[in-house]
């Protein structure tokens, strides 16, 4: 029996931010600290940048937000945390997505 590559099963976190956003800075630190312990793909999206209208329409007034997925793309139906969250909550959501 072959073992699936961990790369194929790796989770992904998409971090939605904007500037200025003090909550975003705190949340980003939490995600970066988890990243030191756990392996996952990471993408950061500033919802106010040109080309991000889709996400601006959803999260302009709700940043920070993270989506956690096992797929290569994120969607509005992804598992998520919003506004104030900590390292423990990020790890718990990663665990839930990875075990689903």
Image (cartoon, helix red, strand yellow):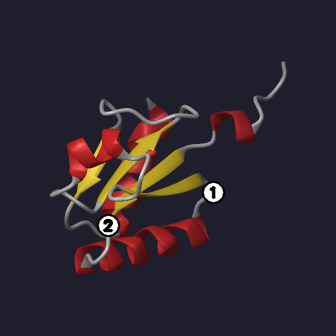
Q: Quadrant of residue 100?
A: top left
The local secondary structure at tag 2 comes to loop
Residue positioned 50% across, 38% down in the render: 98
Farthest-out residue, left: 61
Per the rendering, the mark at residue 18 is: 2
Question: Which residue lies under the disc numbered 1?
Answer: 39
Is disc 1 surrounded by few (<14), some (14 to 19) or many (20+) residues within 10 Å?
A: few
Residue positioned 84% across, 23% down in the render: 2
Farthest-out residue, top: 1
- Where residue 22 appears, as percent x and y from the top left, is 25, 81
- Where residue 31 appears, as percent x and y from the top left, is 44, 67
- Where residue 5 appears, as percent x and y from the top left, is 77, 35
How far separated are the C-alphas under marks 2 and 1? 25 Å
| Residue 11 horizontal side relative to residue 26, left or right | right
Q: Nearer the viewer, mark 2 or mark 1?
A: 2
Q: Is residue 86 above or below residue 63?
A: below
């Amino acid at each position: 029996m072959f073992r699936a590559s961990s790369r194929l099963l790796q989770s992904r976190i998409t971090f939605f931010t904007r500037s200025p956003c003090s909550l975003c800075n705190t949340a980003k630190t939490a995600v970066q600290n988890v990243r030191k312990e756990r392996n996952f793909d990471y993408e950061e999206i500033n919802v106010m940048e040109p080309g991000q209208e889709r996400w601006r329409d959803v999260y302009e007034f709700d940043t920070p937000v993270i989506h956690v997925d096992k797929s290569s793309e994120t969607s509005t139906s992804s598992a998520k945390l919003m506004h104030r969250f900590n390292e423990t909550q990020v790890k718990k959501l990663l665990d839930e997505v990875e075990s689903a």
